[in-house]
Image (cartoon, rainbow, N blue to C red):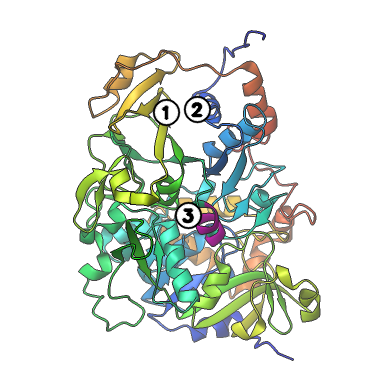
């Protein structure tokens, strides 16, 4: 095997896309959201996971887009798909029925258990600001065997407690009582898995046996301490394995010349 | 032989009363019944109750104009062309719009129950989230779950232990049965058979769940053409109450095999929608400043529309510039 030819020049978003693509295992059935997740699955399909397939929640199953879609409902998602159906098929026919191995999602805020907020800032009953809302994020996150979140690293986004739990992490309230329990307890025999990694512009995080986030690798140019400073909660950096593998020259070329050849998400 | 009840956009909007509950075809910025949305604003509808699996540009047009009282959904924005639903957000923060959040698949469950005549539909998706926090049952807090409005269920949801296979707790989502489904479809037959091209989103469910259905057809075609390949159709003519033939009726949202999303238009609207003032300027120009949808199309101009024209094989525009390269 020849040594990998690592890229010297790349942007933060490039590394995010490449690191996310590496989470895809060959043969995975992947649910992807709009944006970087689309780059990640498309890159994985032409590098490390040629047999992975992609489902978009608007209803295209195993599409083979010729042109990169700009959203999950885009006409481009349906090109050469095995089935072009709707949300009932995507959420119930594919997700609830247990086909989905991996999902790529995003969020505005996350806590140490991986609970994610994409709904409001402040008290929901009298919010200071509204984000887009849940979309399919909590559905996909609740039933995929592994989920990977792609997020921006900022202290105010990596919080002790999120303002609103839009999407379920590893320790969540069981309603109607609100008692905090493990995801396994809340989901009973419906439990399939859950958060596997969080990838930011600074680092890759994973979750320990108790469902608590820890630092797995830091991206080139950052230190574990810097990452810790950018978390409001007390981040465990003792398990850090070192530096995140850099993108290769080939991966960067594929991203800019094949996957996003029009410069939609990577200007 | 069936036949269709063809009406105009003005007549269609006139059928919808203040306070009615509406749902829509499409997905975020694709296949929305925009021509009719503009007409609802022009006619000054008030207190509309929207139930939709997700919102998009159409939601924001209605919300910014003050047409919306209740919004039950899970997401609103303009995808890549506007990251938030500014008017819904402003309405929620100011308290002028009552927002009830569900998850995407929970909204689908509500429509499935409504479509199939069931009082509720079970789902195990999105348990353990604040969507289910009883403190955040906003219609309940507003005293609207007392049974007086037949469109509002007595509970936001319920939880039961699975009585059949002991799988654990499962959610029951109440049926949604809107007064109106406002649908945009690429092809409607002259007997009312409906076909959409590519993804069907939740159109089948919305059509079945609603009491009355209005379809904007990009084109009306012989029913026999659609009946040659019945597996591609989504609804029989008898499920459709009114049909409007309106080319480009989904603009600025996209219509597979006819035209792409008008990204520049949506971006400009999104920027305008960031303030009530900006919205008003937009509406004065594009909604109140034109006499109807034909004048709106004339104002857009043929060159702009041609750029959006879909490649007839690929189903989307292959000529417009989409990104920076």
**What residue does disc 2 label?**
A16
Magenta stretch encompasses residue A91: yes
**What residue does disc 3 label?**
A96
- Secondary element type, mark 3: helix
Say if A259 sits above or below B309 in the image.
above
Say if B207 sits above or below B124 in the image.
below
Q: In the orientation shown, which residue stands out farthest toward the bottom?
A: B1
Q: Nearer the viewer, residue A229 or A236?
A: A236
* Secondary structure mostly taken by the magenta-highlighted segment of the chain: helix
Counting from the top left corner in percent of width and height, residue A176 is at 22, 59
Chain label for disc 2: A
Inter-mark Cα distance, 3 to 2: 28 Å
Residue B240 in sight from this viewpoint? no
The circle drawn on residue A131 is none
Counting from the top left corner in percent of width and height, residue A160 is at 22, 35
Counting from the top left corner in percent of width and height, residue A199 is at 43, 29
Inter-mark Cα distance, 2 to 1: 7 Å
Q: Nearer the viewer, residue B87 or A73?
A: A73
**What residue does disc 1 label?**
A200
Whether pointer 2 and pointer 1 mark residues with C-beta atoms closer than 8 Å, the reply is yes
Residue drawn at x 33%, y 53% as measured from the top left: B127
Query: What stretch of residues is rendered in magenta?
Result: A88-94
Compare marks 3 and 2 and give the one earlier in the sequence: 2
Report whether B53 appears left or right of B91: right
Magenta stretch encompasses residue B190: no
Q: Quadrant of residue B189?
A: bottom right
- Secondary element type, mark 2: helix
Residue B46 in sight from this viewpoint? yes
Q: Nearer the viewer, residue A82 or B207?
A: A82
- Secondary element type, mark 1: loop
Inter-mark Cα distance, 1 to 3: 28 Å
Residue drawn at x 55%, y 32% as measured from the top left: A24
């Amino acid at each position: 095997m020849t040594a990998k030819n690592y890229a010297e020049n790349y942007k933060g978003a490039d590394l995010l896309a490449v690191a996310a693509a590496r989470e895809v295992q060959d043969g995975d059935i992947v649910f992807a959201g709009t944006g970087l997740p689309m780059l990640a699955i498309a890159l994985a399909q032409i590098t490390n996971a040629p047999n992975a397939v992609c489902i978009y929640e608007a209803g295209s199953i195993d599409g083979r887009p010729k042109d990169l879609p700009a959203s999950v409902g885009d006409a481009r998602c349906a090109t050469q798909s095995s089935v072009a159906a709707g949300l009932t098929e995507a959420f119930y026919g594919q997700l609830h029925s247990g086909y989905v191995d991996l999902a790529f999602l995003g969020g505005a805020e996350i806590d140490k258990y991986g609970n994610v907020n994409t709904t409001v800032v402040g008290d929901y009953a009298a919010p200071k600001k509204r984000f887009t809302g849940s979309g399919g994020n909590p559905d996909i996150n609740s039933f995929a065997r592994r989920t990977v979140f792609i997020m921006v690293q900022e202290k105010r986004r990596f919080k002790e407690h999120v303002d609103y739990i839009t999407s379920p992490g590893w320790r969540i309230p069981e309603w109607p009582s609100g008692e905090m329990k493990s995801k396994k307890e809340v989901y009973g025999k419906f439990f399939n898995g859950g958060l596997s990694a969080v990838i930011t512009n600074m680092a890759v995080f994973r979750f320990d046996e108790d469902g608590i986030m820890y630092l797995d690798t830091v991206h080139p140019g950052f230190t574990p301490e810097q990452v810790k400073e950018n978390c409001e909660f007390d981040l465990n950096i003792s398990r850090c394995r070192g530096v995140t593998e850099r993108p290769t020259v080939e991966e960067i070329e594929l991203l800019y010349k094949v996957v996003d050849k029009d410069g939609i998400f990577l200007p | 032989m069936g036949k269709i009840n063809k009406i105009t956009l003005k007549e269609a909007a006139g059928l919808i009363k203040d306070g009615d509950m509406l749902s829509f075809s499409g997905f975020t910025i694709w296949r929305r019944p925009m021509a009719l949305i503009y007409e609802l604003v022009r006619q000054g509808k008030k207190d509309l109750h929207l139930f939709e699996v997700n919102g998009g540009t159409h939601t924001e047009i209605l919300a910014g104009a003050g047409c919306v009282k209740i919004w039950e959904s899970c997401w609103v924005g303009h995808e890549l062309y506007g990251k938030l639903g500014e008017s819904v957000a402003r309405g929620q923060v100011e308290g002028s719009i009552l927002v009830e959040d569900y998850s995407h698949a929970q909204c689908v469950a509500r429509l499935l129950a409504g479509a199939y005549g069931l009082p509720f539909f079970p789902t195990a998706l999105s348990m353990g989230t604040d969507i289910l926090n009883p403190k955040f049952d906003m219609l309940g807090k507003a005293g609207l779950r007392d049974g007086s409005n037949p469109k509002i269920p007595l509970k936001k949801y319920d939880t039961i232990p699975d009585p059949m296979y002991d799988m654990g707790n499962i959610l029951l989502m109440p049926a949604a049965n809107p007064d109106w489904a406002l649908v945009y479809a690429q092809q409607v037959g002259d007997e009312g058979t409906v076909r959409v091209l590519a993804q069907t989103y939740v159109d089948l469910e919305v059509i079945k769940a609603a009491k009355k259905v209005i379809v904007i057809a990009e084109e009306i075609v012989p029913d026999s053409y659609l009946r040659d390949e019945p597996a591609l159709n989504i609804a029989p003519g008898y499920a459709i109450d009114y049909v409007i033939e309106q080319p480009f009726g989904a603009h600025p949202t996209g219509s597979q095999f006819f035209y792409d999303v008008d990204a520049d238009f949506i971006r400009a609207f999104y920027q305008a929608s960031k303030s009530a003032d900006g919205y008003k300027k937009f509406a004065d120009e594009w909604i109140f400043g034109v006499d109807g949808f034909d004048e709106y199309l004339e104002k857009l101009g043929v060159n702009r529309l041609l750029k959006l024209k879909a490649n007839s094989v690929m189903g989307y525009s292959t000529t417009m510039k989409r990104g920076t390269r």
